[in-house]
Image (spheres, rainbow, N blue to C red):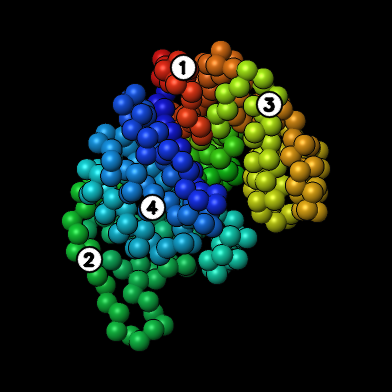
Amino acid sequence: MKVGIAAGYWGAGPPRRMAQTIAEAEALGVDSFWTAESYGSDALTPLAWWGASTERIALGTSVCQISARTPTALAMAAQTIDHLSGGRLILGIGASGPQVVEGWYGRPYPRPLERTREYVEIMRAVWAREEPVTYQGRHYELPYPDGTGLGKPLKSIVHPLRRDIPVYLGAEGPKNVALAAEIADGWTPLWFSPKTDDFYRAALADGFARPGARRRAEDFEVANICWLVEHEDVERAADRLKPVIALYAGGMGAKEANFHNDVFVRMGWGDVCAEIQKLYLSGRTDHAAQAVPTEMVEDVALIGPVDKICEDIVKRWKPTCLTTLILGGWPRPESRERILEAVRS
């Protein structure tokens, strides 16, 4: 199993010491560094800024939201960073949810799987650079058909360093996971739990079995961000993450369409999720966090003293379908090499 480190997206401002953290991670042989975006900081600018000081570590987005940019715009950004980094980009993309897509980007959300398929096809046509790009889909058309009539097919001026930049799909539901296995080079889960490994393996197998599937299980990557909080007291470590889980399970999305909530329900936390969501949507966010059981945190995160964390990695996380464990937290200096070795050994 490979190991990564995540910066995620920002809260009120940039995370502190991130440049130093990335330098330490690269020196210790960490395989990849990942950024993200929601509706504040974007994923590409920090990746380029912090990535400029690195030489070896792979640079990934987990994820770029497809409604934030046209397919050709993201293809341009991807080939630009890939050139500047010497071919180290991993382009993770995702459809996000209706609240963000329609509320923040002002774009329609329906049929996200179909839109994702079209999006990836257009980006790969840009990178292939075989001919001017044209596309007629349900969601994207190039040239645009209802404008001035002056648009014409174009071919990228830049010759991509790699004509096949790896694309990972961020996905939570089984249909989207199967789509990742069918058309992408990897999958980036969110709130993956070892207890749902069989469920996701079945969804991946569905995608691999489809005609024309791009990859097989043996050469497909699964890179999951796993929160890491070290503390001698497991309960206190869990308390650090309970507000985050309450946000995602209770408030990140509408009551009728919260895909993160669905993930925790599949783990067996249906009644708990209903209570968390009720409290969160009524404005009682502190109570929602208190309603998150420590066992629910342990399902999706590495928490507690270093011995427990290493044991969980070896016994629970390594036997899963994951190929890269992306740490959502940088280990303490005194335990750093032990934790990294537990992942890689």
Q: Is residue 251 left or right of residue 90?
A: right
Query: Foreground mark, 4 or 2?
Result: 4
Q: Earlier in the sequence, mark 2 or mark 3?
A: 2
Measured Cα–Cα span from mark 4 to mark 2: 23 Å
Q: Amino acid at mark 3?
A: Arg
Q: Quadrant of residue 166?
A: top left
Query: Foreground mark, 3 or 4?
Result: 3
Q: Is residue 203 left or right of residue 243?
A: left
Q: Amino acid at mark 1?
A: Glu
Q: Number of marks in the image?
A: 4
Give percent across and percent down for residue 141: 39, 71
Measured Cα–Cα span from mark 3 to mark 1: 20 Å
Q: Residues within 10 Å of mark 4 (few under 14, many from 20)?
A: many
Measured Cα–Cα span from mark 1 to mark 2: 52 Å
Residue at image mark 1 = 334
Measured Cα–Cα span from mark 2 to mark 3: 55 Å
Residue at image mark 4 = 44
Q: Earlier in the sequence, mark 4 or mark 2?
A: 4
Residue at image mark 3 = 236
